[in-house]
Image (cartoon, grey):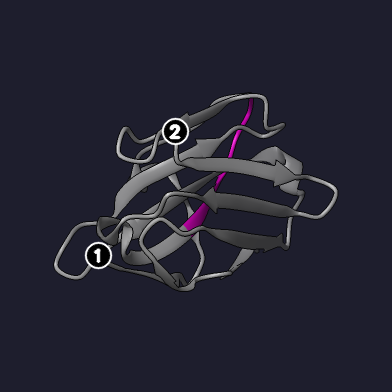
Amino acid sequence: QVQLVESGGGLVQAGGSLRLSCKFSGRTFSLYAMGWFRQAPGSEREFVAAISRSGSRVYYADSVKGRFTISRDNAKNTVYLQMNSLKPEDTAVYYCAAHRSSGEQFFDRVWEYETWGQGTQVTVSS
């Protein structure tokens, strides 16, 4: 089965940058659309960014548009989230997720993803 392992989280000052990575294993990575979500304490899990199987299509939440960039390397079975100009409100546990896709779609709903990683903590100090 698919396994996802996130890394790259940490503590950063406001205005700083982090790059999250999510390593995929167990199936053919290029057949899966991928997404990043986040969950702050006391809040529901929310969509951050999504990317289609080949990486040709990407989609972002309004709150991160222009600051975050999602990308993937199908040769390395890895999806990335480059986060710039971080704000304290970006503090959350960040999760990557995988959806077996039949085409170049992207997905922005929690329920659309069948496999999740364990999450990585991102803390942005003011």
Regarding mark 2 in the picture, which secondary structure is present there? Answer: loop
44 over 52 or under it: above or below? below
Above or below 118: residue 110: above
Rendered position, 98 above or below 4: above
In the picture, measured across the screen, residue 19 lies left or right of residue 38, that is right
The disc label shown at residue 40, or none: 1
* Left or right, residue 33 beside residue 97: right
User: Which of the pair 126/61 is nearer the observer?
Assistant: 126
Name the residue nearer the viewer: 25 or 46: 46
Which residue corresponds to the image point at 32% horizontal and 65% vertical from the top-left? 92
Q: Is residue 97 magenta?
A: yes
Tell me where the magenta segment starts and ends, as one range. Answer: 96-103
Q: Residue at x 74, y 55 (%)?
A: 27
What's the amino acid at mark 2? Gly
Magenta includes 8?
no
User: Of 125 and 31, which appears nearest the observer?
Assistant: 125
Task: Tell me if I can see residue 33 in this picture.
Answer: no
Asked if marks 2 and 1 touch (Cβ < 8 Å), the reply is no
Instruction: Please determine whether, in this image, residue 105 is positioned above or below residue 2.
Output: above
Residue wearing tag 2: 66
**What is the chief secondary structure element of the magenta stretch?**
strand
